[in-house]
Amino acid sequence: MEDGSFCPGSEMKYRRYTVLTITTTLLEEAALVAVVLWLLPKVAINIPFWGLIIMMIALGVYNYINYRLNKKALVKKPMISLDIGSRGRTTTLISPTGYVRVNGELWRASSSSIIAAGEEIVVVGIEGMTLLISPIEAKDNRTRKADAFSG
């Protein structure tokens, strides 16, 4: 790794990602050659061979830059900065799944009840990258608002 850290399984992710990137780049290059040498001449557009070489080099450089930038995302660990009991607000209808915003982050969420968009929720569990949520009772909301105004 470039940053000196080790993430288990990251070498396998890199290997698969590298193979996938090389394969798709070769397919893109083949498609470019087919279009320039076969399809464009049929509609009276002729690109010189040196033009094809420049386009292939540009496509290769573009794919290499994308590879380098996106490879880092494979080993980056998600920032989970919330705990059971964290509160947030739904951004979509939860029926049974949808999205919520907790601590400024957008999360996929699931609930056993239907929760309207814009409602306050509490995190009751985490299953993979999906939050298990429950609505905060309206009575609890009124109590908290009254407490905020009184003191």
Image (tube, helix red, strand yellow):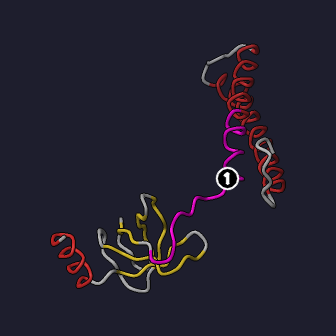
Residue underneath mark 1? 76
**Vertical comparison of 117 with 77: above or below:** below
Asked if residue 69 lies in the magenta stretch, the reply is yes
Tell me the element at label 1.
loop
Three-letter residue code for mark 1: Lys
Report the residue at 49% width, 68% height from top. 108
Position of residue 84 measured from the top left corner of the image (x, y, whole percent): 50, 77
Question: Foreground residue, 52 or 65?
Answer: 65
Q: Indicate left or right for 95 with 55 as reference.
A: left
Q: Indicate left or right for 60 with 123 as reference.
A: right
**Vertical comparison of 25 with 140: above or below:** above
Label 1 crowd bin: few (<14), some (14–19), many (20+), radius 10 Å: few
How many circles with numbers are drawn on the protein?
A: 1
Asked if residue 15 lies in the magenta stretch, the reply is no
Q: Indicate left or right for 101 with 19 as reference.
A: left
Position of residue 17 measured from the top left corner of the image (x, y, whole percent): 77, 49
Q: Quadrant where the C terminus lies?
A: bottom left
Residue 51's quadrant in the figure? top right
Q: Indicate left or right for 143 with 129 as reference.
A: left
Residue 135's quadrant in the figure? bottom left
**Vertical comparison of 14 with 120: above or below:** above
Residue 28's quadrant in the figure? top right
Position of residue 72 measured from the top left corner of the image (x, y, whole percent): 70, 45
Report the residue at 20% width, 73% height from top. 145
Position of residue 9 measured from the top left corner of the image (x, y, whole percent): 81, 60
Question: Foreground residue, 132 or 48?
Answer: 132
The magenta region covers 65-85
Q: Quadrant where the N terminus lies?
A: top right
Report the residue at 43% width, 67% height from top. 99
